[in-house]
């Protein structure tokens, strides 16, 4: 049985989805999976991988053809999450897909000139885009950010810091949340600027992490960076909504990654327990072991079913917005908790091998916490869901 894949469901996945899945799966198994351990140890991966993934159409999913994209539905993105998880390297997919959170604000609210300059080279894999919102003083409380952008003629002068920025070291374009109205300390004073990677005054420091080793993660400092006013995304002081609109799709994608990484752990645990014997009997024949495996499968199936239902409702606009936000928040919590449980159980079942670098379960075990924190921490997700539901 393939624990990484549910039986085909035609009302979710069409033949077009499955053809795309087969192409992506083949590429990942040939070109990515054999190298992930090496790239993880090197704390990087080849930049040309962006262009190779782009050639498959992955980078352009959901973007207009005019910018080199491919219009699609949300289930194409579910396929991307499920297939990338197979290699068991969250850091790799995070960096390769950083454009998926950096470009939507530009596509939604940027000027035609800005969109034409930024989006096509990123979708082609020639340039890299990052989103910079989180600051040292706080992450999930976006409305409290402190990085300032003061208008000076045809430019903004930007000062401040951002941290934990995926693709922050390599990024050519950084979609940055800034405070343009210092008198307004809340959401009303926030704007979005695209800051070019070669802007004078921008410095970057690579960060060491518990997991996602191959991912480029940076601390950014802006020291009197002069950014053209034409790089403003949308209307000044109205950037908060532009940023928040990103989160539904990001969290749904992270939920899909969560149950998919959990399934990787289950697959590895099943393979190991079938091969490993104790006192002449395979581990998989032990009742206590079978129960552990079924506990893993139960959590995976519950999370996957919830995400498929939410993706369908999202695509067909079947829920009111507040309820949808709440359910997506809770889906992210449930799926990443499933990932945490399955990673822990897989490492336990693999025993000493589970503690060794090189197994997918060991890597996923180290990467669980960033999934439970990134895109909105578990605590924030539950609180936001409660407020959306009027609790």
Image (cartoon, helix red, strand yellow):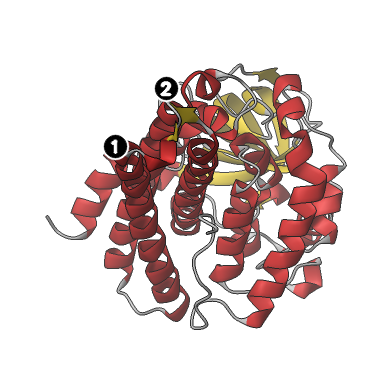
**Looking at the figure, which quarter contains the C terminus?**
bottom left
Q: Is residue 3 above or below residue 290?
A: below
Decide if residue 111 is on the left or right side of residue 299.
right
The percent coordinates of residue 29 (x first, y second) are: 75, 49
Which residue is denoted by mark 2 in the rendering? 137
Q: Which mark is residue 288?
A: 1
Q: Identify the residue shown where x is 30% and y is 74%.
A: 320
Mark 1 and mark 2 residues within 8 Å of each other at the beta carbon: no
- Which of the numbered marks, if any, corresponds to residue 200? none
Density class for disc 1 (Cα within 10 Å; few <14, some 14-19, many ≥20) is: few
**Residue at the (57%, 20%) spot, across then down:** 209
Q: Determine the residue positioned at 81% across, 31% down.
A: 198
Q: Position of residue 252 (x, y in %)?
A: 45, 57
The first of marks 1 and 2 along the sequence is 2
Observer able to see residue 59? no
Local secondary structure at mark 1: helix
In the rendered image, the vertical position of residue 2 relative to residue 289, given as above or below: below
Task: Kindly report the distance in space between the C-alpha atoms of the residues bearing marks 1 and 2.
Answer: 46 Å
Tell me where residue 91 sits by quadrant: top right
Q: Residue furthest front?
A: 280
Q: What residue is rendered at 33% in x and 51% in y?
A: 299
């Amino acid at each position: 049985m393939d624990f990484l894949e549910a039986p085909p469901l035609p009302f979710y996945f069409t033949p077009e989805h499955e053809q795309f899945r087969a192409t992506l799966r083949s590429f990942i198994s040939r070109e990515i999976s054999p190298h992930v351990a090496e790239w993880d140890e090197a704390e990087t991966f080849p930049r040309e991988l962006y262009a190779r993934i782009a050639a498959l159409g992955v980078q352009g999913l959901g973007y207009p053809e005019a910018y080199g994209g491919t219009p699609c539905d949300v289930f194409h993105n579910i396929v991307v999450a499920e297939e990338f998880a197979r290699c068991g390297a969250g850091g790799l997919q995070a960096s390769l897909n950083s454009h998926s959170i950096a470009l939507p604000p530009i596509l939604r609210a940027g000027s035609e000139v800005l969109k034409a300059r930024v989006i096509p080279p990123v979708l082609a894999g020639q340039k890299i885009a990052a989103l910079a919102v989180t600051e040292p003083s706080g992450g999930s409380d976006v409305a409290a950010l402190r990085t300032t952008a003061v208008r000076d003629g045809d430019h903004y002068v930007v000062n401040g810091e951002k941290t934990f920025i995926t693709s922050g070291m390599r990024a050519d374009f950084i979609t940055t949340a800034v405070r343009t109205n210092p008198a307004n300390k809340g959401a009303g004073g926030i704007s979005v600027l695209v800051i070019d990677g070669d802007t004078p005054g921008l410095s970057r420091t690579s960060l060491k992490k518990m997991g996602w080793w191959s991912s480029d993660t940076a601390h950014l400092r802006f020291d009197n960076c002069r950014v053209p006013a034409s790089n403003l995304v949308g209307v000044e002081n109205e950037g908060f909504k532009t940023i928040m609109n990103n989160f539904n799709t990001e969290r749904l994608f992270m939920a899909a990654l969560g149950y998919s990484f959990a399934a990787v752990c289950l697959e590895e645990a099943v393979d190991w327990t079938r091969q490993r014997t104790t006192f002449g009997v395979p581990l998989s024949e032990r009742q206590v072991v079978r129960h552990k495996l079924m506990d893993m499968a139960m959590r995976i199936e519950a999370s996957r079913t919830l995400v498929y239902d939410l993706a369908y409702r999202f695509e067909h606009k079947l829920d009111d917005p507040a309820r949808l936000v709440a359910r997506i928040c809770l889906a992210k919590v449930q799926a990443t908790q499933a990932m945490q449980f399955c990673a822990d159980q897989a490492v336990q079942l693999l025993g000493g091998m589970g503690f060794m670098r090189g197994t997918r379960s060991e890597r996923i075990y180290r990467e669980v916490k960033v999934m439970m924190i990134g895109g909105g921490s578990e605590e924030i997700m539950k609180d936001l869901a409660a407020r959306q539901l009027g609790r």
